[in-house]
Image (cartoon, rainbow, N blue to C red):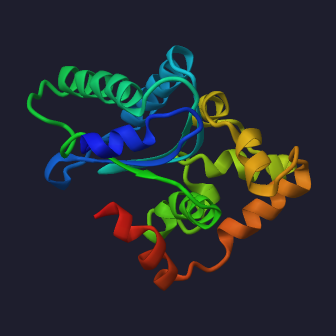
Amino acid sequence: MPRKLRELIDYPSSHIHIVCRGNNQKKIFRKKQDFQKFLSILIEAKKRFRFFIFTLSLMPNHYHLQIQLREDTVSDIMHFINFRYAKYINHVYDSSGHLFQDRFYASHIKDENYFMEVSRYIHRNADRAHLVTAPEDYFWSSFVIYYQKCYPKNRKSIVLSEKKLFQIVDAEEFLNIFCGKQPQKSDFCDYVQFVKEEIDEEKIKKIIEPKME
């Protein structure tokens, strides 16, 4: 990430969209255990650094995070996460070399429209890629947390990924910003409805994807 951009976003309260891609588009998550390990590393990062994670999606060859800084820099946080995960992958698969393409992509979220749309973009990653038919069915996304807050009676047995996501995702803080007040169950339901609305692909191309180039 260019130094000027790091200087722009490395201050308290910055909202940032982060993307890390596998080197040469290769998979960074090969097995279920890899996803679980990454979530465990995020839990470690939340204990070590002061920052919020609002949304996340772990895809086979990349991942998204939507975060808000509090005290620590995005560079320190991402170095901790990616270094530990790359070390794990190299050990488990007896591999070497770069796991990730470059360092990481980071975009400063500077307006309400981008804040809302990037959250939906992240939560719809899996079904847009045809990995699942509905976003709430993807275990490796923070959307399952927001969905369960709206539909608690629809809970099946809680999978390990969901237990970890509850420790990672700052859902109440996110919705406090999203709806401008202390969130109630109805606010989670409104957000779920917002995410599940049909995506305007032209809007995505205009608002989000140019920032990822």
Residue 60 can be seen in this image: no
Quadrant of the rendered image containing residue 182: top right
Where residue 183 sits in the image (x, y, percent)? 86, 47
Question: Quick one: 15 or 172, which is closer to the camera?
Answer: 15
Given the current orientation, which residue lies at the most extreme left position? 97
Quarter containing the N terminus: top left
Question: Quick one: 184 or 203, which is closer to the camera?
Answer: 203
Quadrant of the rendered image containing residue 98: top left
> Residue placed at 9% from the left, 28% from the top?
96
Residue 154 can be seen in this image: yes
Looking at the image, residue 4 sits to the left or right of residue 110; the answer is left
As displayed, is residue 50 above or below residue 78?
above
As displayed, is residue 202 above or below residue 123?
below
Quarter containing the C terminus: bottom left
Looking at the image, residue 154 sits to the left or right of residue 165; the answer is right
> Residue placed at 37% from the left, 27% from the top?
81
> Residue placed at 28% from the left, 24% from the top?
83
Where residue 141 sits in the image (x, y, percent)? 55, 48
**How many badges with numbers are in the image?**
0
Looking at the image, residue 111 sits to the left or right of residue 19; the answer is right
Given the current orientation, which residue lies at the most extreme top position? 48
Where residue 106 sits in the image (x, y, percent)? 37, 48
Where residue 129 sits in the image (x, y, percent)? 41, 68
> Residue placed at 29% from the left, 44% from the top?
4
Quadrant of the rendered image containing residue 172: top right
Question: Quick one: 28 or 7, which is closer to the camera?
Answer: 7
